[in-house]
Structure formats: structure tokens, C-alpha cells
Amino acid sequence: MTPLSMVTGGNRGIGFAIAEGLLKLGHKVLLVARDEEEAEQACADLNGDVHPIVMDITAQGAMEEAHTRAVAVFGDIDILINNAGVMHSDELTELSAGDLQLSFDVHVKGPAMLTKAVLPAMLENNFGRIINVSSGYGSFAEKLGGPPAYAVTKAALNALTVKTAASVPAGKNVKVNAMCPGWVHTRMGGSSAPLTPEEGADTAIWLASLDEDSPNGMFFRKRKPISW
């Protein structure tokens, strides 16, 4: 069976590298982006069994409609990688309510609603992988470094990961984990970042490929568990 993977924010950076890596493993990939032209161009650049899905994960109704259409055409999602992200660099005293809301919608609400949409079929089919692309900035153990809106909402994404993983009944081959890609040379990470998008994508691809005995409800960096 060819796994069907959905990658949000797949049109550039880490998401693009994740989609590329999954294609190399023989997956069919649904590449999610808000902009139709960018989604189609990314799929053309990847040149494989990859299909553009135009979806605004911050708009619940539009997201649900896009997911329903995708499932009708391609079938149930086997692997969901919640990769889409946004970063506002303002300090807490300068942070706007709008920026905080957008960070929450992209990092928490969108992944939560997509997880809600795909999880029932995963449980019914007894197979599924949900990987939340988080950050060490969202780790209490690492003191929530980084910009406030980003750190707080990534911490909430980590909480969503733990809560979702705990909801999976024992014995079901459905795994829900979070990963930190590290400091990656992307538009968000900046030109000083030491890691390539491919290096940042590696742990997500690895988590998507693990077998039934793989971990559930854990946080990883460079394929190794890290603390919440």
C-alpha cells in the first residue's frame, strides 16, 4: 500500500524538504499551502506523485472543506505532518493581539482541527502517523526561548501532541509525536542558521516511517527524545 501523506506549509523550506523526502520513500504526497500558485509551483519542482492542496488552516470551515475534497479524491490520510509556521519577533510588551492570535491559529488551532479531521480514519484503519513540527523554543525544559508568541504557541502545540497521543486507544497502530527541526536556513530561520532544510526535515521523515513498535507521545530532535 502506498502511504498517503499530507504536509502543511509544504511549498517551501522544511515542509518542502519533508515532502521531497517522503516522495523518495515512495509516498503519495498532498502538499498544502494557502497560495495556489505557490502550491502548484512546489509540486512542479518536486516532480513526483505530489498534488497541491490549497488550504487555509487558520479558517476552520475552509480547512474542513479542503480536507473533505482531498479525501474524496485521494482517500484517507495515513500521515499528517503539521509543519506550517509563523514567527513574530516582537517582545511581549510590543506584541499585538492580532499577531498572537495568528500564531495560535497556525501552530495550535490549525493542527488541532486537521488532527480532528484525520484521526478517526486512522483509528478505523489501524494505521496513522501525526507529526507536529514544534521547536525547542516551546520546551519548558529549554526555558521557552525565543519570541513570546512563537514560544507560547509551540508549547501549546506540544501539549496538543501529548493530549492527542493519550487519546489513542491501546493497541492501535497510530502514533502522535512532536519534533524540533533545529535552527534551519529558511526564510523563517534566516541566513545564519547552520542546518539545511533537508537536515531539519530528517526527524519528521523518520517519525513518519517508523513501525508499529515506535514511540507515541514523545518529543524528538535529531531522532533522539528531548524533554517537554
Image (cartoon, rainbow, N blue to C red):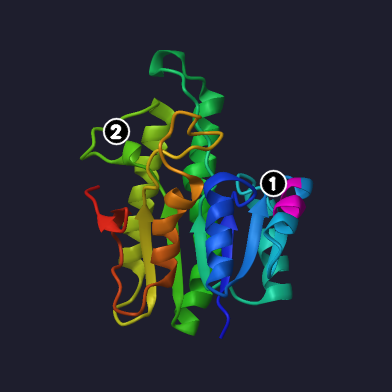
Tell me the CA gap for discs 1 and 2. 28 Å
Q: Main secondary structure of the magenta part?
A: helix
x and y percentages locating residue 42 in the rendered image:
70, 52
Instruction: Rate crowding at label 2 as few (under 14), some (14 to 19) or many (20 or more) other CA atoms within 10 Å.
Output: some
Would residue 121 appear left or right of 227 to someone viewing this image? right
**Residue 26 found in image quarter:** bottom right
Location of residue 53 (image quadrant): bottom right
Identify the residue at horizontal 24%, vertical 51% (top origin): 226
Nearest to the observer: residue 152 or residue 225 = 225
- Where residue 5 sits in the image (x, y, percent)? 56, 68
* Image quadrant assignment for residue 69: bottom right
Provide the secondary structure element on which disc 1 rests: loop
Instruction: Identify the amino acid type marked 2.
Output: Leu
Q: Residue furthest right?
A: 37
Q: Which residues are magenta?
A: 38-42
Residue 116 visible in rendering: no
In the rendered view, tell whether residue 98 sits above or below residue 199.
Answer: above
Q: Which residue is mark 2?
A: 144
Report the residue marked by disc 1: 34
**Residue 143 drawn above or below residue 34:** above
**Quick check: is 134 in the magenta stretch?**
no
**Residue 206 location (% of width, % of height):** 40, 65
